[in-house]
Structures are given as structure tokens and as C-alpha cells.
Amino acid sequence: MTTKTKKGASMAAEKQKITFERTYKAPLEDVWDLWTTRDGIESWWGPEGFVAKVHKLDLRAGGDLEYSFTATAPEQIEALKGMGVPLTQVVRGTYKEVTPRAASCTRIWRISSPASSRTRSRWSSSSTSCRTASAWS
């Protein structure tokens, strides 16, 4: 992909990276389970007004993750219909690395999309909390 400068010259677009960090008052094992198990993901993942459903979860390097979000709240359903968008969106990815450890762990996967992206999630813990950092590029 290229972008135009003010003078009209072309240059390669820089790859963007977004990082989110959050600290939870929970043990590492609980946070790991919320991100890496069917029950965990379905219990909390997704925007408000949608339900998450995990279709495939093979938590190993080369394994697949496939889940969907389905609009359930009337305002989300109305908005999606108004945009001509299906009520269910499917996300597919392949785990590139999965490294659980006692004090920290890593999960890396690539999302299948036209603008393919890579997600890296790292967890670390103390005696009272768990810190997560997720980066998309």
C-alpha cells in the first residue's frame, strides 16, 4: 500500500501497531483461561449487545481459533441491518505461538482477513494481579 504526501510523492505506508494494556486483580491462571478456553471466551468476549460463540479452538502453534459475534440487542440488530451487514461476523485465526508459564505466558495468532494482522498477547502476574498487553500489527 502506498500513501501520497502533500507534494504528491508516493511512499510506502508504515505498518501500524496498536497496543492495549490492562491489569486485572485476578490470578494469571484465571485470565489465561478467559482468553484460551471456549467457556472463558464465550463468557466475556465481544461488544455489548452481541454474543460470542467459539467454533474452533486448538490452542497450539499451528492450531486454529474461529469464533463469531452475533448481534442480540435490538439496537445492534437494527444498526447492522441498516448498514446491510450480516448479524453474525466470523473471525478466524491461526495460533503462531502459545507459551504458558508459571509467572507469565504468551499467545500469538494471525487473523485471517484481507488486511491480515498479527496479534500478540502477553500476560504476567504478581501475587495480587495479572497484567495483560495485547498488540496488533
Image (cartoon, rainbow, N blue to C red):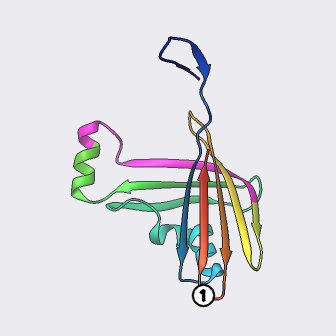
x then y, percent, for residue 78 = 22, 48
Relative to 84, is 104 above or below?
below
x then y, percent, for residue 12 = 63, 23
Question: Left of 51 or right of it: where is 67?
Answer: right
Q: Name, please, the residue furthest toward the top.
A: 8
| Quadrant in which the N terminus is drawn | top right
For mark 1, what is the residue? 128
Question: Left of 29 or right of it: where is 74?
Answer: left
**Label 1 environment density (alpha carbons within 10 Å; few <14, some 14–19, many ≥20):** few
User: Could you say which is closer to the camera, residue 47 or residue 7?
Assistant: 7
Question: Quadrant of the rendered structure where residue 19 is?
Answer: bottom right
Relative to 93, is 21 above or below?
below
| Disc 1, SS | loop
Question: Quadrant of the rendered structure where residue 35 is?
Answer: bottom right
User: Could you say which is closer to the camera, residue 55 or residue 41?
Assistant: 41
Q: Which residues are magenta?
A: 81-97
Looking at the rendered structure, the kind of residue marked 1 is Thr
x then y, percent, for residue 69 = 43, 55
The residue positioned 57% from the left and 68% from the top of the image is 38
Asked if residue 84 is among those painted magenta in the image, a careful observer would answer yes
Asked if residue 130 is among those painted magenta in the image, a careful observer would answer no
Relative to 78, is 26 above or below?
below
Q: Name, please, the residue furthest toward the bottom.
A: 127
The residue positioned 76% from the left and 52% from the top of the image is 62
